[in-house]
Amino acid sequence: MSASFEAIVLSRLFTFVVGTDAVPIVVHEATIADQSPELAALTRGKMSKCLVAEATWEDVDKETFIIFAQFAYIGDHTTPQMITEPTEILPSIDTWDFGPVKKAGKKHVPGPPEPIPAFKNFSYPLPIPRFNFADTCHPTVAEGPSENIGEILTIHASLYILAEKWGIDRLKRLALFKIHKTLNLFSLDISKLDMLSALCDTRTPMKERQI
């Protein structure tokens, strides 16, 4: 059961020292403990970290933790607008010309493999309930001279990794939802393939790479 708003604001303050720069960020204990059993043990257990109300997360940078804290308080988080340069869309395989196909007589020819479902048709249900926070939580796109696709995907991937480590299932689902929406907002071209490949190799847990 989620903590009430009263329980959150009356709970003790808990400090997270984040990143290699050791930036202290103070949050309410109840809103963090409510995210998963693992975080409840971290903030309310009998370890020394719990007694002093402080934990060090050197592997989480300041920007990622601030977004995580926003999610912990309101159930969603602000998503920066994605900027893309106008690009030429790669032709669909359906338009490729392979020339005439010679008949092979009565020799049995295996039928074509079952088509792979289009990526845009996959579904990652948005966890509910959500909090109204203007329109800043919805992935959006605009054209501009300097693309930031890698930055935005890195934000979502970093949140997914944090959620995977600390057992925050709802944040994992939200990150997948926003990654899927973001990838459908731009046209894929050759220049973006290397960026996406590098992001998958460095940010995505092995068991989720087939997604």
Image (tube, grey):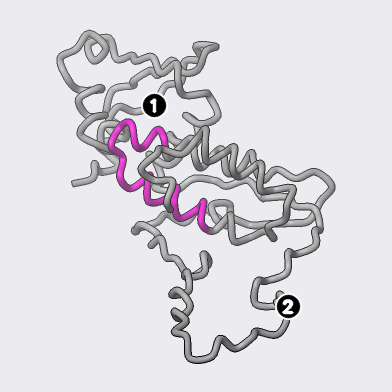
First in sequence: mark 2 vs mark 1: 1
Labelled disc at residue 27: 1
Q: Nearer the viewer, mark 2 or mark 1?
A: 2
Residue that badge 2 annotates: 97
Residue occupying the far bottom of the picture: 106
Vertical relation: 127 (above or below) 47: below
Q: Amino acid at mark 2?
A: Asp
Return the residue nearer the eye: 136 or 28.
Answer: 136
Q: Label 2 vs label 1: CA separation? A: 59 Å
Return the residue nearer the eye: 78 or 131.
Answer: 78
Q: Secondary structure at mark 1?
A: strand
Residue 71 locus on image (x, y percent): 42, 42
Residue 55 locus on image (x, y percent): 34, 15
Vertical relation: 38 (above or below) 49: below
**In the figure, is residue 139 to the left or right of 176?**
right
Q: Amino acid at mark 1?
A: Val
Main secondary structure of the magenta stretch:
helix
Magenta segment range? 161-180
